[in-house]
Amino acid sequence: QVQLVESGGGLVQPGGSLRLSCAASGSIGSINVMGWYRQTPGKQRELVAVMTSGSHTNYLDSVKGRFTVSRDNARNTVYLQMNRLKPEDTAVYYCNLHLIGADGSANDYWGQGTQVTVSS
């Protein structure tokens, strides 16, 4: 059973910073992708930033240069450092773990979501 526990959301003024954390527990394997998605009401969930177990990253264009995803593989934890936040970054942020099995199968697991609100 895989579980993801997030922390770090909240209210911040435009231009401010927040750091999200997500700790995974259970059988997460050695080949996986961990990262962050976000969703606002009426819109589809979108990829924000992810990092593979081989440290390759992928970012949403609008967050490049402002957000940084990182991992501590020893702790099975992924982080999202968000700087120079903008009101349009307001969303519920979800941690994601994408597991790739030895047989090529794939499974996705999600955290409970954490609200990030950027407002003055």
Image: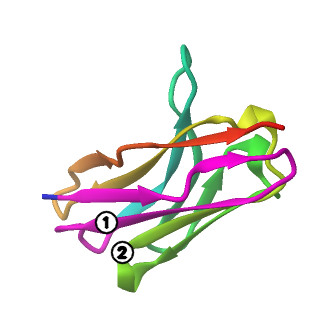
Instruction: Classify residue 20 by image quadrant.
Output: bottom right
Left or right: 102, with 33 as reference point: left
Residue 38 in picture, x, y percent from top left: 55, 38
Bounds of the magenta segment: 2-31
Q: Residues within 10 Å of mark 1 (few under 14, many from 20)?
A: many
How far apart marks 2 and 1 lie (CA) works out to 5 Å
For the residue labelled by badge 1, is the local secondary structure a helix, a strand or a loop?
Answer: strand
Badge 2 vs badge 1, beta-carbon distance below 8 Å = yes
Task: Give SS at disc 2.
Answer: loop
Tell me what residue is drawn at x 79 percent, y 48 percent.
85
Label located before the other in sequence (2 or 1): 1
Residue in the foreground of this view, choosing between 14 and 88: 14
Q: Amino acid at mark 1?
A: Ala
Residue 11 inside the magenta-drawn segment: yes
Q: Is residue 76 magenta?
A: no
* Percent position of residue 17, x then y: 75, 59
Q: Which residue is mark 1?
A: 24
22 relative position to 1: left or right: right
Q: Is residue 87 left or right of residue 10?
A: right
Determine the image quadrant of residue 39: top right
The N terminus sits in image quarter: bottom left
| Image coloring type | rainbow
Residue at the bottom extreme?
74
- The structure residue drawn at horizontal position 85% and vertical position 44%, both measured from the top left corner, is 14
Viewport quadrant of the C terminus: top right
Residue 91: quadrant of the picture: top right
- Give the number of the disc on residue 94: none
- Frontmost residue, 4 versus 97: 4
Q: Which residue is mark 2?
A: 76
Compared with 42, 37 (above or below) is below
